[in-house]
Amino acid sequence: MHYFNPDLYDAKKWAKEAKAAGINYAVITTKHHEGFAMWDSALTSFKVTNSPIGRDLLAEFVDAFREEGIKIGFYYSLIDWHHPDFTLDGLHPLRDDMEAREKWKGDMASYRTFMHGQVKELLTNYGHIDYMWFDFSYPERFESWAPGKDKNDWASEELEELVLSLQPHILLNNRIDLDRGVVTPEQYQPQHAMTKDGEAVIWEACQTLTGSWGYHRDNLDWKTPDMLVKMLIDTVSKGGNLLLNVGPNGRGEFEAKASKTLADIGEWMRLHERSIVGAGESAIEAPEHCCVTQKGQVLYIHLFSWPMKHVHVKGLEGQVAYAQFLNDASEVHFMEHEPGKVRSHIHAEVTPGSVTFELPIQKPDVLVPVIEVFLKP
């Protein structure tokens, strides 16, 4: 805390970069596991306003992103390794310190009061908040000397009631051990749309620009803009959202490579937003090396690799009214394959009932080309 001074932090610049990248909601870390509050909490001295920067950085973030029309989410760690009443367990940094394990006498009841109080501050002092992102429960992390922490440690039922009493419209994620809320797979892409008891659920893929959630000077595992756009498309094609982390450095700036990546994603989104925002799963089977999203009577075929002249889509015969590339609205011609009819030797092996879209040899100059297919009413 004594050296935390992100003097180059400019929330308005962050918000403009996010908006330009096509971001519709943003989740900021208000407190992580180390317990440092990024707002002027009345419940602790371990907070940003007692650091050299001396400002409520959360308030600046909320104002800037709200001004850009971006929905606001708060990440809040249920864990707090700084608080003296947070009991040691197998996840705590002092778990291997035998002296600390003997002397540390936490009181989770007292900690719960503190934690619930901080959540109340967050949901009272910053206006309309769209999403509360709690992190995380770990009942399975059991040690002989200390169990992991679950809904009883957080008083999750009461916590949920508190959140909804303050912001009835809000979304909550699924990490307070109540088996409900937005499902949050982290650092992997689900193979299928996420469901519970056979029903679709609200979910988001939680991913990072590099291999780290925070700024890490030596982590060079940068995902390319091409990969990130494909992850976004893949997520939407399975009915989910993409939560993409950007870790600013210690002076409060995005790295140049992060800003360039966001700008590249933003340029793709500028041309292809309608294949993503408001779109979702389609019943149409995606061709090889493609992902399909749908919005009403419009299909969006995202071509992850560029084929030789043709894309064949099963089950569309008789349904297509018109097709075009989304990036420039240039027409894409198509051919239907009726059962019992072979149009030419070139398409002799195409599944009857399919539609073949005829493509140029040259790939459009975008990260992922998209064919916009208008279906007949």
Image (cartoon, rainbow, N blue to C red):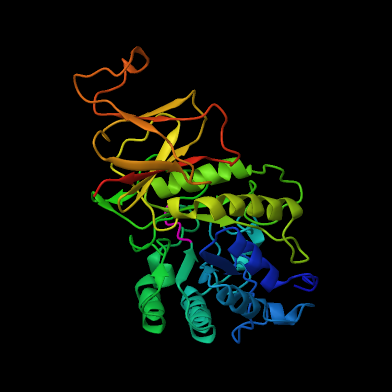
Q: Is residue 55 above or below residue 257?
A: below
Q: Residue at x 59, y 67 (%)?
A: 29
Horizontal side of 246 relative to 310 (left or right) equals: right
Q: Nearer the viewer, residue 124 or 60?
A: 60
Q: Is residue 231 above or below residue 108?
A: above
Horizontal side of 254 relative to 301 (left or right) equals: right
Q: Which residues are magenta?
A: 136-140
Q: Nearer the viewer, residue 86 or 353?
A: 353
Q: Is residue 310 above or below residue 257?
A: above
Residue 157 location, quadrant: bottom left
Q: Is residue 325 magenta?
A: no
Q: In the image, residue 92 lies at what x, y percent?
A: 59, 59
Residue 270 location, quadrant: bottom right
Q: Residue at x 42, y 63 (%)?
A: 173
Residue 336 location, quadrant: top left
Horizontal side of 133 relative to 373 (left or right) equals: right
| View extreme (top): residue | 345
Q: Residue at x 49, y 58 (%)?
A: 146
Q: Residue at x 57, y 49 (%)?
A: 268
Can residue 243 be seen in this snapshot? Answer: yes
Quadrant occupied by the N terminus: bottom right
Q: In the image, residue 356 lies at what x, y percent?
A: 36, 28
